[in-house]
Amino acid sequence: MDHTVFVVENDQRSRDLYMQWIGQVGYAGKAFSVAEACFSILEDFEPSVLFLDLGEDPAADLEPLEVTLRIKPQISIVAIVSEKNSHLGPRAVNAGALSFLVKPVAPEEFKSSLKAAIQRHELVMEVRTLQAEVADKRQVQGFVGQSDSTNRISSQIGALLKNDLPVFVQGETGNGKELVARLIHKNSPRASGPFVGVNCGAIAREFQVSHIFGKGGGSEKPGFFEEANDGVLFLDEVGDLTLDVQAMLLRTLQDKVIRRVGDSFNTAVNVRIIAATNRNLKDMIARGRFREDLYYAIVVFPIEIPPLRERQIDIPLLVGYFLNQYCEDLGRSVPEISDSALNCLIAHKWVGNVRELQNSIQFTLLACKTGRIEVKHLPKAISRHGRLESLGESDDVLHLIDPLSGNVKTFDQLEMEVFTKARAIAGGNVTRTAEMLRIGRATIYRRMRAAENEKVQSDDSK
């Protein structure tokens, strides 16, 4: 693969040195004295790496970096900062830069950063190629839903069918991170190998090394890596690993070997890593609690799972899926579910995400002895938020008659009432409201403006 490296540097001498070093490594380079000149080129061309000097002015900020990432969100950027502005380096990494260098920059330090950035760019390009290959293929079955985010996740899983890239799954607890990992395993060339799931947060810190890498020296006990050999090792809550274990994990990812506790020799392993967490690893890096080099080793192909409350359109399908699954296990026919009961399930906040919904369906099936699920069969924590048995007392029910005038409401009044109630169910989130009502976001914003105008006119008339 041919690589082009861009350099944005105001100082002529430094700019010439950087271009010389780029040539010594064997890559083509293009230099700019100001960031604005680079921005116009980035609109139509993406370099493999960009070395971006953030300036020596004490008032310098991250604006050049932020503008660059808006133009090319996945570009590999190495920020260059002056010694007096060295505080900008860590901030640049948190904002999206791959790494940073502090002036004066040594030749080997520059070349080492360049090689690491090139490797990262090659991985990004491989991921893009894989995504393009599956863009028009059938989505992988198993991740249930019809929201845009669910369709995106299914497509991402499909992009991983024929490769061995490390995968990183981000999402709240109970949101299906292990399900995604198992689907990747099931649909990959490693499907015949083992799937070993590990909750890193459940292992005492003093036992993490022996559990993950195994025991040797006469008391042989294989660790999780050996158990997962030729298969997948799913490391859930990877942020709970100690820094020592993180260093060992990085070495294993790089060298494909482990060393058991008590052994003086290495053991080769062939394992695909899928890591997951509900925590912000970049914040942990800034606090010195997670290794930055390990972060870039595991976050090669990221998959983010939004919380269930942000994809309410998926809830009816998930309810049907779990009802069919558990009724099959219980050997009973699948009951109907009333509109009022389904509305309660859709309106619930689902702090525990899909796992909470799954448990709620199990409870409901045990409580329902008939062929129809009603609000009374739901867990109290859910039914109390949307009980519709008394229609006159419910905020979720539309009434055709205006109680003040006694007249039938106009279509505009009913439309506004539908919009208002749907927006309340969606917690004020415009995207979720649009998905629930099957309308565009632009329509939502027009209705919001209309509601505000009506309020102003009403206030003025008083």
Image: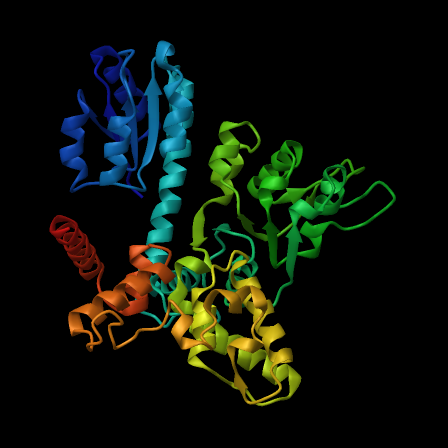
Residue under the point 81% across and 37% down: 262
**Along the line of sight, which residue is nearer the eye, 164 or 295?**
295
Q: Where is residue 170 in the image (x, y as percent from the top left)?
A: 48, 50
Left or right of 33 on screen, residue 65: right
> Which of the 4 quarters of the picture holds residue 405?
bottom left
**Along the line of sight, which residue is nearer the eye, 382 or 358?**
382
Q: Is residue 369 above or below residue 13?
A: below
Left or right of 198 on screen, residue 45: left
> Which of the 4 quarters of the picture holds residue 117?
top left
**Which quadrant of the figure contains the N terminus?**
top left
> Which of the 4 quarters of the picture holds residue 204?
top right
Residue under the point 79% across and 44% down: 215
Left or right of 426 on screen, residue 335: right
**Along the line of sight, which residue is nearer the eye, 94 or 328?**
328
How many numbered discs sit on the rendered protein? 0
Q: Position of residue 314 (x, y in %)?
A: 41, 68
Residue under the point 36% across and 9% down: 84
Q: Where is residue 132 in the image (x, y as percent from the top left)?
A: 31, 59
Q: In this view, does 277 lie above or below 381?
A: above
**Along the line of sight, which residue is nearer the eye, 363 or 36?**
363
Residue under the point 32% across and 67% down: 436
- How is the structure coloured here? rainbow
Q: In this view, does 460 lie above or below 232?
A: above
Q: Where is residue 442 in the image (x, y as percent from the top left)?
A: 18, 58
Does any portion of residue 232 appear in the rendered image? yes
Does any portion of residue 141 appear in the rendered image? no
